Amino acid sequence: MLDAGAPKPALILGFPVGFVGAAESKAMLAAD
């Protein structure tokens, strides 16, 4: 979407479905 010229969001909220993989999900969101 950003490549198509869409504005960059001011805030991104990410909620893992459960506790399995929550640390990995948090790290992936923080890396972006």
Image: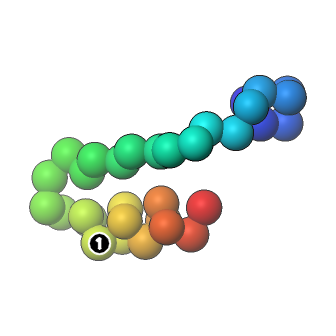
- Identify the amino acid type marked 1: Ala
Q: Which quadrant would residue 31 be assigned to in this image?
A: bottom right
Looking at the picture, does residue 32 appear above or below residue 13?
below
Query: What is the x, y in percent for residue 15?
Result: 28, 47
Residue 2 lies in quadrant: top right
**Point 85% across, 27% down: residue:** 4
> Which of the colour schemes (rainbow, by chain, secondary structure, one colour) is used?
rainbow
Residue 32: quadrant of the picture: bottom right
Element marked by disc 1: helix
Residue 8, percent across and down?
70, 39
What residue occupies the far left of the structure in this picture?
Answer: 19
Q: Residue 10 at x, y = what percent?
A: 58, 42
The furthest residue to the front: 10
> Is 4 placed above or below 29 here?
above
Residue 7 as seen in the image, left or right of residue 29: right
Left of 28 or right of it: where is 2? right
State how many labels appear.
1
Residue 9, horizontal then vertical, whole percent: 61, 38
Q: Is residue 31 left or right of residue 19?
A: right
- Going 50% across and 44% down the picture, which residue do you hit? 11
For the point 43% across and 71% down, which residue is it?
27
**Label 1 environment density (alpha carbons within 10 Å; few <14, some 14–19, many ≥20):** few
Q: Which residue is mark 1?
A: 23
Quadrant where the N terminus sits is: top right
